[in-house]
Amino acid sequence: MTRVFSGVQPTGHLTLGNYLGAMRRWAAVDQHRADSLFCVVDLHALTMDHDPARLRRLSRQTTTLLLASGLDPDVCTVFLQSHVDEHTRLSYLLECVATDGEMRRMIQYKEKAAKERDRGGSVRLSLLTYPVLMAADILAYGADEVPVGEDQAQHVELTRDLAVRFNQRYGHTFVVPRVTLPGVAARVMNLQEPARKMGKSDESGAGVVYLLDEPDAIRKKVMRAVTDSGREVEYDREGRPGVANLLEILAACTGGSPQALAGAYESYGALKKDTAEAVVEVLRPVQARHRELCADPAYVEGVLRDGAQKARAMARPTVDAAYRAIGLLPSVERTELMDVR
Ligand code: AQP
């Protein structure tokens, strides 16, 4: 059976981008057709300046939202990255096959490091090495597919490179995974700055629809979306990125295609109105389920406890095999060696 792995970072409140680009597909499709693991990758949240209390809150909220979006712990595995030591065990081995040059080429590293430097902060070493930890997240489970938004595709490419290199040097150990992207809304853009990705760590939040935004807040944000001075509704990602973004969001929410939807509108106002309502409707059941789950924190804790147990059992054999392949003596063999002497 195909195995799927994906994750989400508890670095802020989850956005419509996270939902349309990744989470919705995990719940609607992946968990039912594959042996799937979905992970709140909390260690990745330590790569930038962070507040420990906020991280704890966001880790709980992110887990609750994954469940609210439809992940069913009876058919998939939901867990926290820091609960399974195999991720960091494997990450070090992969650091020994990755190169400094390929880490520095990662777009997210360049962007986030530049932002941190502009703020006068210092760049954590873990920001540079985090794609290797992400590779370990994926390879530890022998995942065949990694369903992500477009912004994570480069990191999955790196994961493939590291798996191939490790296998060539030390013998076949890892499945080489492939990225899967959604057909539409693979990169939802910021409503105020359509050249920029809608991200959860955006400072103002004006162009970001959060999954827990009230319906009126969603309507306001969509109605104020930056478009352009033209009048005709055309799907042109390069020339009219703001309108194209709205069309993609509408298409992702209603199931149409952005090109076909463009022909159905004569004004930006009407497009914005329908997009706002479509987003409100898509998020309504997620928000309702989130409220129910918040009233039952013991259930969410139980999901994480069981998920970690299942995940550990899946990851351990592969990570142990990697340790052996690279030349490290497993502790059992070490005892046997001493007996022989
Ligand atoms: N705008 C987006 N459009 C489509 N997909 C997106 N994803 C994120 N933003 C969009 C996808 O959501 C999944 C989880 O994302 P993540 O938390 O691992 O990574 P991120 O969103 O890049 O988060 P950061 O780095 O904490 O902060 P921001 O958001 O501020 O950059 C992934 O599959 C991702 O592709």
Image (cartoon, rainbow, N blue to C red):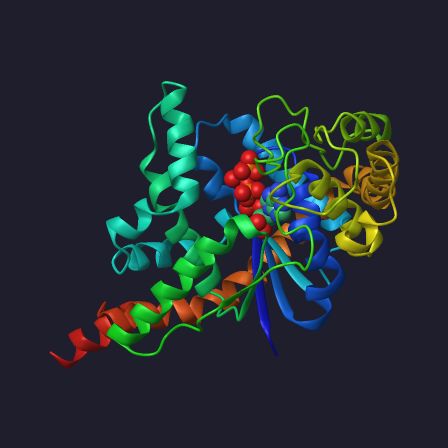
Extreme residue in the bottom direction: 340
Classify residue 249 by image quadrant: top right
Q: Position of residue 271 (x, y in %)?
A: 84, 38
Residue 8 seen by the camera: no
Q: Position of residue 290 (x, y in %)?
A: 79, 41
Q: Position of residue 45 (x, y in %)?
A: 49, 38
Name the residue: 34% across, 63% down.
162
State whether residue 289 is above or below residue 165.
above
Between 130 and 184, the one lying in front of the other is 184
Q: On the picture, is 117 further left or further right than 55? A: left
Between 224 and 26, the one lying in front of the other is 224
Q: On the picture, is 4 further left or further right than 183? A: left
Q: Position of residue 272 (x, y in %)?
A: 83, 35
Classify residue 320 by image quadrant: bottom left
State whether residue 287 is above or below residue 253.
above
Q: On the picture, is 311 further left or further right than 302? A: left
Query: On the rendered image, what quadrant is the N terminus found in?
Result: bottom right
State whether residue 319 is above or below residue 132.
below
Classify residue 170 by image quadrant: bottom left
Between 311 and 280, the one lying in front of the other is 280
Name the residue: 78% across, 31% down.
222
Residue 155 seen by the camera: yes
Which quarter holds ligand 1?
Answer: top right
Name the residue: 58% across, 38% down.
197
Query: On the rendered image, what quadrant is the C terminus found in?
Result: bottom left
